[in-house]
Amino acid sequence: MDVNLVAPVNELGYGVVGYNLLKTLDKLGNNVAFFPIGPVRWAGDAGLRSLIDKTRGNALMYNKDADCIRLWHQFELDLFVGKGRHIGWPIFELNRFNDRERLHLESVDILFVCSQWAKDVIEENGIQVPTFVVPLGVDLDVFNLNESEKNSRPSYCKNSTIFINIGKWEKRKGHEELLLAFSEAFEEGDDVELWMINDNPFIKTGNNEWRKKFASSKMGAHVKFFDRFDMHSHLRVLFNQADCGVFPSHAEGWNLEIPELFACGTHVIATNYSGHTEFVNEDNTFLIEPNGMELAQDGLWFHGQGEWCSYPVQSLIDRLKEVHELKQTGKLGINEAGLETARRFTWENTVSRLKLALQETQLVSQGS
């Protein structure tokens, strides 16, 4: 299959998706002409330079009639390559769109979205563009259950219940609720840790402000902060060492880290709403049930143009306590249901679903 791919490749969310999509499309024998959005950055892959050289070389003499996929925000789906079908692939979090977003979403021939939740949002907003669910994946060569890593914890927390959170510092991701809940759920003498891997390159000194809030809280001595990792294999070590990821998000476009934790056999606490409902369920996740919707406002990126879910902080407190009790009584074990979920959500599956969607739309076009 010939495909023109417009996407970022870097350490941020869209860039991680772009990297894995580019690599897997090429690995499976597709002829990819790559048009990067922004600088290409990816540590830890010795073969990336040759892949970029190959696919950028393809872009010099690209197939002008091939489908073009643009993996980018819903408010910038305007620049495509060639005369083939223009396919927008946005990853969004809210349930409503403003006029600019609607213009861009309605300007493409086909939309790919990551989850059924996102497809429902598109349709509920009256956007009449053929829309297909193409779920994202996890690289099982990088993220996997590793017993030696699980047994390599530092001595100070050998028997602790370790919770882990990763993702940009953001109100949307529920960091305010996590700060409150962790302090309410536990006392200073409890054998519990909260590992925070959070960096938001867009808020600069705001990163330190978030850290200070957690460090100065009642349970601050039990919170450990990590800088961004250049290589995902380093991240996998912590994912194996931890007992439970905790993601009290108000809304997510996908949440790449949960399938990665699943692949390591690690448990997860997460809200039962938005993009990650494509793969979290009561079998593989300690779910936080929403109790309604509220205007999405954080004073930075969200100004009430849409909604995200609300939930009682007590439900997060209860889930934290539940996991801690299971761990301390030896009943937590490996997240077997999570492992099975990760095996289904691979990047190879993503490419397979992508090709099926393209074939289906082609057949519809030929029949009309």
Image (cartoon, grey):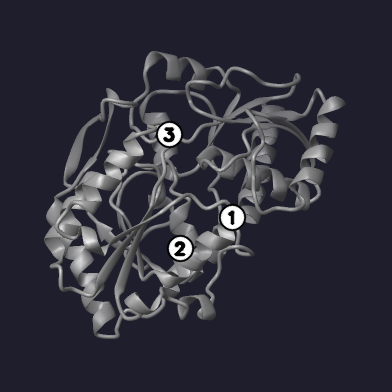
What's the distance in space between the residues labelled 1 and 3, CA to CA? Answer: 26 Å
Could you tell which of marks 1 and 3 lies nearer the N-terminus? 3
Residue 36, given in percent of the width and then of the height, sits at 68, 30
In the rendered view, does 310 fall on the left or right side of 203?
Answer: left
Near mark 2 (Cα within 10 A), the count class, few <14, some 14-19 or many ≥20, is: many
Q: Tell me: residue 30, above or below residue 129.
A: below
Task: Give the number of the mark in front: 3 or 2.
Answer: 2
Q: Are marks 2 and 1 in contact (CB under 8 Å)?
A: no
The reply to whether residue 316 is in sight is: no
Q: Earlier in the sequence, mark 2 or mark 1?
A: 1
Label 1: state its secondary structure.
Answer: loop
Labels 3 and 2: the sequence-earlier one: 3
Q: Measuring 39% from the left and 48% from the top, which residue is drawn there?
A: 198
Please name the residue that numbered disc 3 is placed on: 92
* Circle 1 residue: 231
Amino acid at dot 2: Leu
Q: Amino acid at mark 1?
A: Met
